Amino acid sequence: MSVERIREALKPLGIPVTALQGDTRAQTYAVITEILEQPEQCADNREIVAGYYAQIDFISKKNINEMVRRATRLLADAGIIRQNKRTEFVTEAKVFRHSIRVLLVYETEGEENGG
């Protein structure tokens, strides 16, 4: 559910967005790695709000600063909160990697959640 929501938010970028493993055939692509999903708010021993934490790595052989700024806006418009961002050039692979850690908060009340 949450990976799909991130994928949907990034669709206007026109690049492959995959979970866990990137589409290395593309010159520029994004990879979503799930970090943690946990209760954020509980009441009466039931989870009512959950937080989904993920990292999105944008990888390219060219400078993609503007695209990453646009991605950050698209995520915010979709209600996905940016927690931090890091940019590096991976010398061995000769690629730029922009990593954005995000948080997606959603209501779970009424869902089966083992509480």
Image (cartoon, helix red, strand yellow):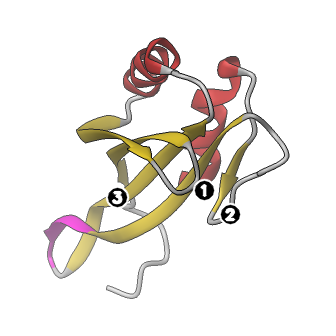
Q: Residue 97 location, x and y as percent? A: 46, 42
Q: Quadrant of residue 85?
A: top left
- Residue 80 lies left or right of residue 49; in this view the side is right
Farthest residue to the bottom: give it: 114
Image quadrant where residue 65 sits: top left
**What residue type is disc 1 on?**
Met
Task: Determine the residue located farthest toward the right in the rendered image.
Answer: 25
Residue for badge 2: 21
Alpha carbons under labels 2 and 3: distance apart: 17 Å
90 w.r.t. 53: above or below: above
Query: Which numbered marker is on residue 53?
Result: 3
- Mark 1, secondary structure of its residue: loop
Circle 1/circle 2 CB separation < 8 Å: no
Residue 23, how many percent across, how many down? 78, 51
First-in-chain label (3 vs 1): 1
In depth, the one of 42 and 104 nearer the eye is 104
Q: CA distance from mark 1 to mark 2?
A: 18 Å
Instruction: Please tell me which residue lies in front, 13 or 108.
Output: 13
Q: Is residue 13 magenta?
A: no
Circle 3: is it few (<14), some (14-19), or many (20+) Cα within 10 Å? many
x, y (%) of residue 69? 40, 17
Q: Is residue 29 left or right of residue 62?
A: right
Residue 42 located within the stretch drawn in magenta: yes
2 or 3: mark nearer the eye: 2
* Cβ–Cβ under 8 Å for marks 2 and 3: no
* Residue on which the image places disc 1: 1
Q: Quadrant of the C terminus?
A: bottom left
User: Which residue appears at 47% of the width and 65% of the height?
Assistant: 34
Q: Which mark is residue 98?
A: none
Q: What residue is shown at x 62% (from left), y 66% (from top)?
A: 20
- Label whose residue precedes the other's in the sequence (2 or 3): 2
Residues drawn in magenta: 39-44
